[in-house]
Amino acid sequence: MVTCRNTAAATRAATLAVTALRDRGQPVRALVVVSDGGPEPKDAAARLAMLQDRVGGVVRMPFVAALRLVDDPGTVRLSARARAALATIRDLAR
């Protein structure tokens, strides 16, 4: 599994990581893209589209502002979108 933010620089680094892992025979079951709360740049979206067929799945995790404010992330009530993203990540990780 590889994770990155939804920025141009982060998706470039994710592309390099996925390529390196695949070159070593290591499949990437999921690429988790964590939103920083802003819109996804066109360059980032293009890289993620390119990676779609090279990983088990691309999962976009929405920004959860409350996670920045607590010591225990288990106390945060997640949105339906965030819960769905976590369920997809779990499925891909199996």
Image (tube, helix red, strand yellow):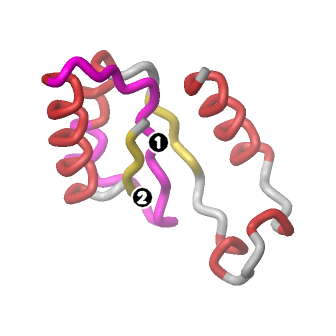
Q: Is residue 20 above or below residue 44?
A: above
Which amino acid, by three-letter code, is at mark 2? Pro
Residue visible at 70% across and 47% down?
82
Q: Is residue 10 left or right of residue 82?
A: left
Q: Position of residue 56 (x, y in %)?
A: 43, 19
The residue drawn where x is 24% and y is 33% is: 18
Within 10 Å of the Cα at label 2, are there few (<14), some (14-19), or many (20+) other Cα atoms?
A: few
**Taking 38 as reference, is 50 left or right?**
left
Q: Quadrant of the C terminus?
A: top right
Does residue 50 lie above or below 38 as drawn?
A: above
Residue 55: x %, y % from top left: 35, 22
3 left or right of 94? left
Q: Residue at x 74, y 81 (%)?
A: 70
Q: What numbered label is drawn on residue 32?
A: 1
What residue span does the magenta drawing correspond to?
24-47
Give the residue pinned by disc 2.
39
